Image: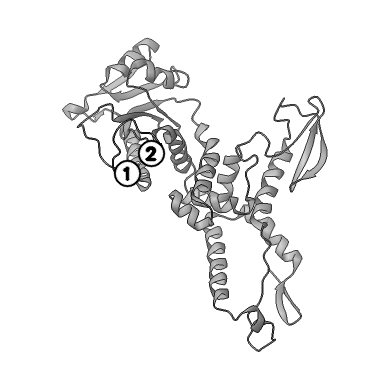
Amino acid sequence: MISRVEIRGEMVVTDEDFQRLLTSIPALSHAQLDALASAIRGRDSAASTEPSAASASSGGVGEPTKICVPKHADGRAAITDIEARFATDPHCPHCQGQSLTKWGSANGLRRYLCKPCDVTFNALTGTPLAQLHKREVWLGHAGAVVDGLSLRKTAGRLDVHLSTAFRWRHRFLKAPKAVKAKVLDGTVEADETYFLHSEKGSRKLERPARKRGGKAKKRGLSDEQVPVLIARDRNKAMTDQVLADRSEKSIAAVLEPIIARSAVLVSDGAGAYRAFADRLRIPHVALNLSEGEHRWGVYHIQNVNSYDSRLKTWMRRFNGVATKYLDSYLGWHRTKDREGDQLNASRLLVAAWG
């Protein structure tokens, strides 16, 4: 329970209780963070209709309560969480050594000295969050990523420039996009989905510009489409990868390092999958989808197709994604799908830290 005391006729929260509130922020769920943000926005809206500072200082009856919130409150809470996690297993980002000693602090971050390297660092050094400014809105940006907001909506919510929201998005997605299944076993479903090749944001286009989120000029598969391989087993372990083409070589580069030799590969009738399975000598079920064969006994590709559908539906909100950034968005959706309701701003921020 948060207690309040009266100071010079004003009700204020005690410093001790306020610090307790700050330290609890990393543990709040996404719903709780939204509720807290809504309460603060409501307080700000009410404040905008309050009398001016000059009239408020007159000491009249019914004056609004004044609450002073430190500018970097959210930033401190985020850094406190990250530094606490780093302190459980501190290591040098340069040599991975653990012969360290504390070396004061700078810019609000605890520094360490690596004895073998003779260099200093902090918990953010060598991570995607290193040298990222405006820590006071890191949690807010992480919340925007969790909500799947567009860049313009993110910039508007956080009151930052559009280019800042863009740079932050890709910093926050750098680590999550690399988290993929290391092993696929059991029944492994594989299929491709396709996205329009896009040069969105480029200053020089290799073709005439089209409306964002538009359609391909050619019917069916063509060089306008970018293939993305989706592979998923029945335990929901999965990987995805933008492919150069649908050849056996491209598919093997993704699947061969991670598919168990005891697995059963299920796919459509494309010859590349057949050639890949034959070379690795693993069982392969090829479904003739063009003839309406969507299941053979217990084997089907409905799980991977369902994921494809969720991915495509989620991607529509961005009105087209530049092909060079497609892997980041794949990692973004993969994280949301894997974490489900457990994903909140704090968890996303830790994932971005890596």
The numbered mark at residue 314 is none
Q: How is the image coloured?
A: one colour
**83 is higher (above) or lower (below) than 231:** below
* In this picture, residue 126 sits left or right of residue 203: right
**Residue 336, x across and y down, in percent:** 46, 43
Q: Residues within 10 Å of mark 1 (few under 14, many from 20)?
A: few
**Along the line of sight, the residue nearer the viewer: 19 or 238:** 19
- Which quadrant is home to the N terminus? bottom right
Q: Check the image and name the residue furthest to the left.
A: 291
**Residue 51, x across and y down, in percent:** 60, 81
**Along the line of sight, the residue nearer the viewer: 283 or 123:** 123
Q: Which residue is mark 2?
A: 200
* In this picture, residue 181 sits left or right of residue 52: left
**Element carrying mark 1:** loop
**188 is higher (above) or lower (below) than 309:** above
Q: Earlier in the sequence, mark 1 or mark 2?
A: 2
**Element carrying mark 2:** loop
- Which quadrant is home to the C terminus? top right
* In this picture, residue 29 sits left or right of residue 310: right
**Residue 118, x across and y down, in percent:** 81, 28
Contact (Cβ within 8 Å) of mark 1 with mark 2: yes
> What's the distance in space between the residues labelled 1 and 2, CA to CA?
8 Å
Residue at left offset 63%, top offset 52% = 26
Task: Name the image quarter holding residue 353.
Answer: top right
Residue at left offset 42%, top offset 32% = 324
Task: Name the image quarter holding residue 302.
Answer: top left
> For the residue marked with disc 2, what is the amino acid?
Lys
- Say whether residue 343 is visible: no
Q: Which residue is mark 1?
A: 212
Residue at left offset 76%, top offset 43% = 110
